[in-house]
Image: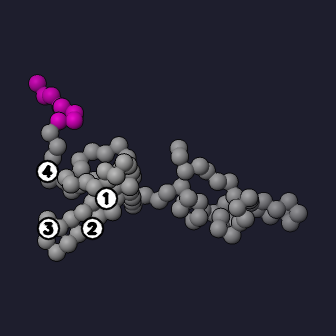
Amino acid sequence: MYLKIRGGTARNDHSSLCLSCRHATVVRGASLRDEIVQCARLSDGVNRITFPVTSCSGHVDRMHATISEMEETAWILRSDPRRNEVGFVKASSLKPRDRYVLSEDW
């Protein structure tokens, strides 16, 4: 019989989640023990992490673009009925009122 236990003992062979999180500031020194990790998601002055994090409900991967970053690079399909044209324009070339802006919080 095979049992899989979820949330059991954390594995030590993985790096801390903070190293890939958008909300973390990681400062390293010359020694391996010289490391400061600050978390912007934590409040009440307790935002320094002193241990390798294996699970975090506020983790946001810094390699993934935010919605506002995607909006800046997006191409928007527009039609011009006067010229009878349809085409793409860069979102950054439009006025803010002409863009369809999604909220940051989904």
Q: Identify the residue under disc 4.
A: 12
Q: Quadrant of the N terminus?
A: top left
Q: Which residue is mark 1?
A: 38
Left-right relation of 38 to 82: left
Please state which amino acid type lies under the numbered disc 2.
Val
**What residue would you read off at disc 2?**
27
Q: Quadrant of residue 79?
A: bottom right
Nearest to N terminus: mark 1 or mark 2: 2
- Using the image, determine if residue 53 lies above or below residue 91: above
The residue tagged 3 is: 32
Tell me, yes or no, whether the two marked residues, 1 and 2, touch with CB atoms within 8 Å: yes
Q: CA distance from mark 1 to mark 2?
A: 9 Å
Point out residue 83 in the picture as x, y percentages from the top left corner.
86, 66
Most frequent secondary structure within the magenta stretch: loop
Q: Residue at x 18, y 31 (%)?
A: 5
Kind of residue at disc 3:
Leu
Inspect the image, locate mark 1, and give the three-letter code of the amino acid beneath it: Gln
In screen coordinates, is 100 left or right of 82?
A: left
- Residue 30 vertical placement versus 7 (above, below): below
For numbered disc 1, what is the local secondary structure?
Answer: strand
Q: Nearer the viewer, mark 1 or mark 4?
A: 1
Q: Quadrant of residue 40?
A: bottom left
Please provide percent x and percent y for residue 47: 32, 53
| Marks 1 and 3 in Cβ contact (< 8 Å) | no
Element on which disc 3 rests: loop
Q: Which residues are magenta?
A: 1-8
Q: Are marks 1 and 4 in contact (CB under 8 Å)?
A: no
Let me know if residue 20 appears in the view: no
